[in-house]
Image (spheres, rainbow, N blue to C red):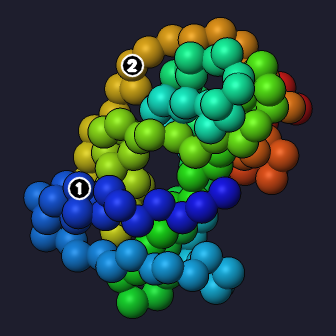
Amino acid sequence: MVNVSVPHSEVTALLEESDLDFRFHSKDDDFALKTYDTNIMGRFSCPNDECGSTGWSSKKIAITIRMYTGDKYNARVYHQRCQECKRLSQPILDDSYAERVAYRLKKWSGVEMEAPVYGGESNGPHIRSLCEGCKAGHCSEGKWYC
Ligand SMILES: [Zn+2]
Ligand SMILES: [Zn+2]
């Protein structure tokens, strides 16, 4: 589990469209005003050189978005384990990260928007034992089966 701050500039760019300005909050143990569990898309590659896995893509990467006082936010992206060797892997995120984080922050800020259409069918069953989001109880995909 890590906080991903790299795509912050992309989130900022999307927020500017609605005249919003949020800063990235690097601590995630503080009290958050709002918390939202959702999922994003991305790709994993297995960090284990001896593993035969060529990596996998996921349309259900668990993410927890949090908003704090003083126009601050952060997002925790949950890792997944390799199906072959069970090693933990950090995802390479696509545009869905910034889109979903910005959408949530706009919504929390009272910006009127049309509900987004999240394309893409799930690529295979969600394997809860391999998902750190499920383990932490923050995976919106996993909750559907609970
Ligand atoms: Zn592996
Ligand atoms: Zn999950």
Badge 1 amino acid:
Glu
Q: Mark 1: few, some, or many residues within 10 Å (few <14, many ≥20)?
A: some
| Depicted 74 relative to depicted 123: above or below | below
Q: In this view, does 93 lie to the left or right of 49?
A: left
Q: In this view, does 68 lie to the left or right of 134?
A: left
Q: Specify the farthest residue to the bottom.
A: 70
x and y, in percent, of residue 116 in the image: 34, 34
Badge 2 amino acid:
Gly
Q: Name the residue under label 2.
A: 119
Name the one closer to the observer, 74 or 105. 74
The quarter of the picture where the N terminus appears is bottom right
**Residue under the image location 27 percent in, 58 percent down:** 11
Name the one closer to the observer, 8 or 51. 51
Pointer 1 and pointer 2: residues touching (CB < 8 Å)? no
x and y, in percent, of residue 7 in the image: 32, 56
Task: Give the image quarter of residue 89.
Answer: top right
The label number, if any, that marks residue 10 in the structure image: 1
| Depicted 127 relative to depicted 9: above or below | above
